[in-house]
Image: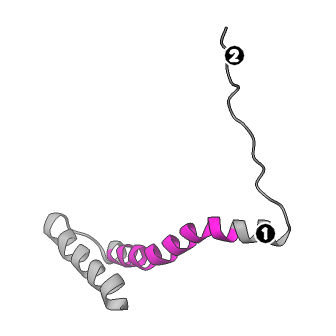
């Protein structure tokens, strides 16, 4: 599974990078690092609302309902 999510896309992007511009080894390392961080950041950012709701539930703090617009009275 790691091959399909990290190694293969990184290899493809390195091949594409070679076509257009000359890159240094540091650029290749940064590219691979970016591909390694994508799954971690995705899981972290998508799980933040769930973690926040679990913390609210644990401390018994509910999300309060409030009306954002006032209703206009007609004549």
- Residue assigned mark 2: 73
Q: Please identify the quarter of the rendering in which residue 49 is found.
A: bottom right
Which secondary structure, mark 2?
Answer: loop
Q: Main secondary structure of the magenta part?
A: helix
Q: How is the image coloured?
A: one colour
| In the image: residue 57, left or right of residue 14 | right
Give the class, few, some or many, for how many residues have Cα within 10 Å of label 2's Cα (few <14, many ≥20).
few
Count up the numbered dots.
Answer: 2
Residue for point 35% across, 83% down: 6
User: Which residue is the extreme one toward the top?
Assistant: 75
Provide residue 27's location: percent of width, then percent of height: 34, 71
Please name which of the two marks, 2 or 1, marks the residue nearer to the observer: 2
The reply to whether dot 2 and dot 1 touch (C-beta < 8 Å) is: no
Q: Which residue is mark 1?
A: 57
- x then y, percent, for residue 55: 77, 70
Tell which of 59 and 71 is nearer to you.
Answer: 71
**Magenta highlight range:** 28-51
Nearest the eye: 60 or 73: 73
Q: Residue furthest front?
A: 75
Residue 9 appears left or right of 19:
right
Helix, strand or loop status at disc 1: helix
- Vertical placement of 38 versus 49: above or below? below
Q: Earlier in the sequence, mark 2 or mark 1?
A: 1
Residue shown at 18% from the left, 76% from the top: 15
Q: Locate the N terminus and report the quarter of the image it occupies.
A: bottom left
Q: Is residue 53 above or below residue 70?
A: below
User: For this view, does 26 lie left or right of residue 41?
Assistant: left
């Amino acid at each position: 599974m790691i091959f399909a999510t990290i190694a293969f896309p990184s290899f493809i992007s390195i091949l594409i990078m070679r076509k257009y511009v000359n890159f240094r080894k540091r650029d290749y390392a940064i590219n691979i690092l970016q591909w390694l961080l994508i799954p971690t950041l995705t899981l972290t950012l998508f799980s933040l609302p769930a973690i926040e709701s679990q913390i609210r539930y644990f401390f018994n703090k509910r999300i309060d309902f409030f009306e954002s617009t006032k209703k206009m009275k007609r004549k």
